[in-house]
Image (spheres, grey):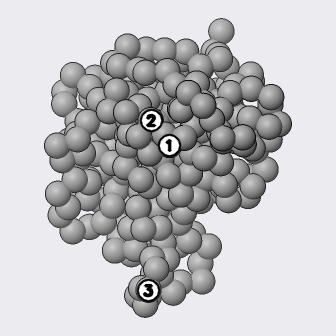
Amino acid sequence: MKSSLSIEFLGTGTSSGVPMVACRCSVCASTDRHDKRLRSSVLIRSEQTTVVIDTTPDFRYQMLRSRVEKLDAVVFTHSHKDHIAGLDDVKGFNFSHNASMPLYANAETAAALQRDFYYAFADTKYPGVPELDLHPIDDQPFMVGDLHFIPIRVKHLHMHVTGFRIGDFTYITDANHIDDQELRKIMGSKILVLNALRKQKHLSHFTLEEAIAVAQQVGAGQTYFTHISHQLGFHAEVSRELPEGIHLAYDGLTVYLD
C-alpha cells in the first residue's frame, strides 16, 4: 500500500543562494519572498517516515524554519559543499532522538563525508560530535522506513550525481545530462523536480530551456524547477514564461502526492 507524500522545498537556490553575497543586481535586491532562495534541499514526509535530501550550509536554519522535530535519515545527491556542509547540525536530532542519524550516499559522497566530517567517524570521539550511521548506496533501490528510493544516475559535467525516484515523485538536482536508460526510470512520474540554473548556457547545469525540454520529454503531471541562480531572473517574470504544468519552485513550497 502506497503512502501519501508531502514534499517541502527547504531551499531552491544554487550554491551561492539568492541573494548572493556582495551582489547588487535587481534580483538579489528583490523584496519578493519568492526571490529569496536558500541552498537546494527537500523534506519528504510519508505517514511514517521523514527524510531530508542533502544537508546544505543552511540546514540548521531550514530545520528551525520548517519546525522539523523528527528526522529519520538524510539521503545525499553528491559531495559538493552546498549539498553536505550542514551535516554537523544533525546532532540536534541525535540528542532529541537518542539515536545516530542514518546517512545514505554513493561511494564518492560517502568518502567525502568521512573526510570532511572526520571527527564524527573517529574511533575516539570528542563529546558532542554528531553520531552518524553511514549506508553506502549504488544503483540498486533501497528503503528508508516506508519510503522506496530508486537511484537515478545523472551527469554534472564529469561528476556522477544521484537523483531519486520515490513512488511517483522524482528529484534531480545538479545535472546537465541524463542518459536514456536513467531517463526511463523517471517516466511516469507525477511530480518531477529538476534543476534549471539560468537562461545562459552552463557547463554543468541544465539551462531553463534544457530543463523545459527534459520536463516535456518526461511528461510529468507537474514539474518544478530548483537550484536556481539570480541570473535566471525574477520568479514572477520567469513563471509567466513557462509552459503549462511547469513551475519555478520556491522556498517553503509544499506539494502533495497521494
Furthest residue toward front:
124
| Closest to the observer, 77 or 96 | 96
Does the rendering let one see residue 220?
Answer: no
The tag on residue 117 is 1
The tag on residue 114 is 2
- Judging from the image, what secondary structure is the residue with disc 1 in? loop
Classify mark 2: residues with Cα within 10 Å, few (<14), some (14-19) or many (20+): some
Give the x, y percent position of residue 220: 41, 35
Furthest residue toward top:
1
To which quarter of the image does residue 133 belong? top right
Indicate the quadrant containing the N terminus: top left, top right, bottom left or bottom right.
Answer: top right
- Judging from the image, what secondary structure is the residue with disc 2 in? helix
Give the x, y percent position of residue 63: 70, 51
Q: Which residue is mark 3?
A: 22
Cβ atoms at labels 1 and 2 below 8 Å apart: yes
- Judging from the image, what secondary structure is the residue with disc 3 in? loop
Is the residue 210 above or below the residue 124 in the image? Answer: below
Residue depicted at x 37% and y 27%:
106
Question: On the picture, is 217 further left or further right than 77?
Answer: left
Q: At label 2, which amino acid type do we have?
A: Gln
Q: At label 3, which amino acid type do we have?
A: Ala
Is the residue 141 above or below the residue 51 in the image? Answer: above
Residue depicted at x 74% and y 26%:
99
